[in-house]
Image: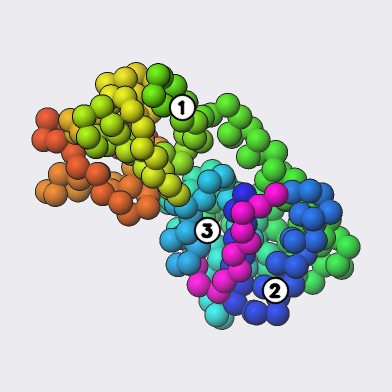
Amino acid sequence: MSIFILEDDVFQAQSLKRSIEEICLAQHIPYNFIEATSRYEHIINKIPSCTYLPIYFLDIEIKHEERKGLEVAQEIRKVDPHGIIVFVTTHSELASISYQYMVSALTFIEKDQPHPERMQKIAACLQHYVTKNKVEHKEDYFFVENAYTSVKVPFHTIEYIMTDDPHRLKLITTNQLIQLYGSLKELEQIDSRLIRCHKSYLVNVQQMKELDVSGQQVILMSGKQVPVSRRMMKKMKAILKDR
């Protein structure tokens, strides 16, 4: 699991990180990493590599910009519509206007709360995070098995699949490259979320960000580019429009 902290005060960032580590250890909550940073770009760039839905603890005031955390939450939502956002702040008065930013935040945690209450609220957020990941990813795997191949990966990590040598394919996920035997025709029948965008490529519609019409490419959440054939351009436009 992936945990992000946006905080420009180094002491407060490390304090929050230690609190999260203590709770995860005590409650046996697994995680891949805890990223504490004052630069929101680091968070945005790392989201595509997350295997599960992330949780974000965002300070609202960053480098004396009182509502920067709310704006960062909007940027996060552009690439991650389902992750859990928690605001950690001294500006609790902004809770009443946070809905205007339409980021679906889970809750606010006040920095000046007594330590036991603060820990209890962080723990509740992390438990919600665990529960949501179990629901989101229950049985949502891409599974291929034939005489030559047995592959099982979380579907949401798949970016695209391409032909390699005859009867061989490359499955590219957010964090690995898998070679397998089979045909694109076989694989596109397994899951309707895999769309043929080119004679040699299938793309995961959940990973598509935008379409470069002049360059005949679809741009993925990670920034990777996948070719789109001329005859498939109209269909790809319709898919992106309806998402």
Q: Which residues are magenta?
A: 30-40
- Pinpoint residue 205: horizontal percent, then vertical percent: 35, 35
Mark 3 = which residue?
73
In the image: residue 50, left or right of residue 106:
left
- Mark 1 or mark 3: whose residue is earlier in sequence: 3
In the image: residue 84, left or right of residue 205:
right
Say which mark, if any, is on residue 150.
1
Q: For the residue carrying disc 3, how many other residues have a C-alpha within 10 Å: few (<14), some (14-19), or many (20+)?
A: many
Q: Secondary structure at mark 1?
A: strand
Relative depth, front residue between 74 and 226 = 226
Residue at figure coordinates x 63%, y 61% from the top left:
34
Residue 231 covered by magenta stretch: no
| Amino acid type, residue under disc 3 in the picture | Ala
Residue at figure coordinates x 70%, y 58% from the top left:
108
The CA span between labels 1 and 2 is 42 Å
- Pinpoint residue 24: horizontal percent, then vertical percent: 76, 54
Q: Secondary structure at mark 2?
A: helix
Relative depth, front residue between 116 and 49 = 49
Q: Secondary structure at mark 3?
A: helix
In the displayed structure, would residue 82 be above or below residue 141?
Answer: below
Q: Nearer the viewer, mark 1 or mark 3?
A: 1
- Mark 3 or mark 2: whose residue is earlier in sequence: 2
Mark 2 = which residue?
14
Residue at figure coordinates x 44%, y 22% from the top left:
145
In the displayed structure, would residue 90 be above or below residue 189?
Answer: below
Q: Nearer the viewer, mark 1 or mark 2?
A: 1
Q: For the residue carrying disc 1, how many other residues have a C-alpha within 10 Å: few (<14), some (14-19), or many (20+)?
A: few
